[in-house]
Amino acid sequence: MMVGHTLLVKNFRALVKSERLAHGYLFFGSEGVGKRLFALSLANFLENGEFDFDEDKQLIFNDLILIEPNENKTIGIDAVRELKNFLSQRPNKSLRRTAIIDEAEFLTTEAQNALLKITEEPPESSLLILIAREPEIFAATLGSRLQRIYFSVLSLKDVEEGLKNRIMNYELGIVKKAAEDSRGSFGLAVKMLQDEKFQATSKLAEKFLKISFAERKDFLKSLLEPEDFDILNFLDAVILTLASKQKVDYNLWHRTLKLRQDISNFPLNPKLQLTSLLANGQ
């Protein structure tokens, strides 16, 4: 279900209808604002005539390939070779063979160079969409070959209405609070209300902020031990918890917000960064 971005939907419908759709796009903007969903909805429109997509339902595409980071959080040359082979074939049903690379900031340098060659001579019936938070993360030569489409944060009204449509038997006050705390990210609002793991992480964030700085070293050590520890989830929870306090520690809030952004955009060691930022005092 698409939330917000009505003007972008209108514009891309018109581009498809007038046969002026480019061969390559870079969708960028904050996390959870609908970039991936928009890309999938566009692919569905090209193939099935409907500009919408429900990720909770399994929809089989004939002419779509979705590339995501592997377990090591990289997208390498082999993935791009697979993509190249896919795009070289003519569409079976859709107007375009569409390749979507989600979290494209994890493309290796070698993979970016291989992508550049594809964008220099794109197959006539191909569509390539890269999804990332920031456009500057890519090599200038690759970035210049893609049309940049910015996805703004969503309005409070859009997030609230999206939650009402998604959640059955909702409590209005809880939905309003989640929308207000989401910072314009529908994805984050959904996690706050429906993701049990994120809710558990929020309790850890509250505990973390209550203990003294002297106690945080041991707390962080135990927190970072599990292999599946989600650093971004934890930072989101810390940011939300800080913002909800009557007396906000703006210094820590801003530093945590910046760390959250940096970890999303750059290949930093999140555990070292978190330890350095949050365990060393105010």
Image: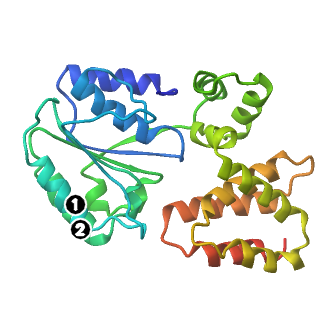
**Which part of the image, by quadrant, shows the C terminus?**
bottom right
Binning the other alpha carbons within 10 Å of mark 2 as few (below 14), some (14 to 19) or many (20 upward) gives: some
Residue at coordinates 41% horizontally, 32% vertically from top-left? 57
Residue at coordinates 87% horizontally, 77% vertically from top-left? 215
Specify the quadrant of the image occupied by residue 270: bottom right
Binning the other alpha carbons within 10 Å of mark 1 as few (below 14), some (14 to 19) or many (20 upward) gives: many
Q: Is residue 208 above or below residue 135?
A: below
Tell me the SS state at disc 2: helix
Q: Amino acid at mark 2?
A: Ile
Task: State left or right for residue 262 relative to residue 13.
Answer: right
Specify the quadrant of the image occupied by residue 165: top right
Q: Position of residue 96 (x, y in %)?
A: 17, 35
Task: State left or right for residue 177 relative to residue 262.
Answer: right
Residue at coordinates 19% horizontally, 20% vertically from top-left? 18
Q: Position of residue 49 (x, y in %)?
A: 26, 20
Foreground: 44 or 170? Answer: 170
Residue placed under numbered mark 1 in the picture: 80
Q: Amino acid at mark 1?
A: Val
Q: Is residue 52 above or below residue 122?
A: above
Q: Position of residue 266 (x, y in %)?
A: 49, 67
Specify the quadrant of the image occupied by residue 166: top right
Tell me the SS state at disc 1: helix
Q: Position of residue 93 (x, y in %)?
A: 14, 29
